Amino acid sequence: TNEYINGKVKSDGTRKIGDLVGGTVVGLEDNYLIIE
């Protein structure tokens, strides 16, 4: 199960931070995007 918290999509897996910044995708968490 994933949950949407403060513009971020969190999953049950390990958080993997990516290099994409600038107000959109800042990282990946398993199959979910972390949006800011």
Image (cartoon, helix red, strand yellow):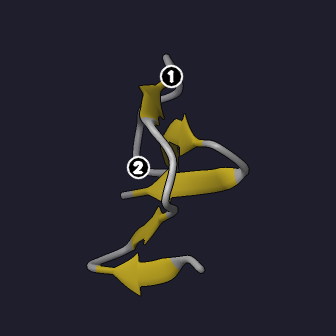
Looking at the image, residue 32 lies above or below residue 19: below
10 Å neighbourhood of mark 1: few (<14), some, or many (≥20)? few
Residue at image point 64% right, 43% down: 30
Give amino acid for label 1. Answer: Gly
Residue bearing the label numbered 2: 23
10 Å neighbourhood of mark 2: few (<14), some, or many (≥20)? few
Q: Residue furthest left?
A: 6
Q: Residue 27 in the image: x percent, y percent?
A: 49, 36
The first of marks 2 and 1 along the sequence is 1
Which of the numbered marks, if any, corresponds to residue 3? none
Q: Residue 7 in the image: x percent, y percent?
A: 37, 74
Give amino acid for label 2. Answer: Gly
Q: Residue 16 in the image: x percent, y percent?
A: 47, 28
For mark 2, give the secondary structure. Answer: loop
Q: Residue 1 in the image: x percent, y percent?
A: 59, 80
Q: Is residue 6 left or right of residue 22?
A: left
Looking at the image, residue 34 lies above or below residue 14: below
Circles 2 and 1, Cβ within 8 Å, touching? The answer is no
Q: CA distance from mark 2 to mark 1?
A: 13 Å
Looking at the image, residue 10 lies above or below residue 32: below
Residue closest to the eye, 21 or 5: 5
Residue bearing the label numbered 1: 18
- Residue 14 occupies which quadrant of the picture? top left
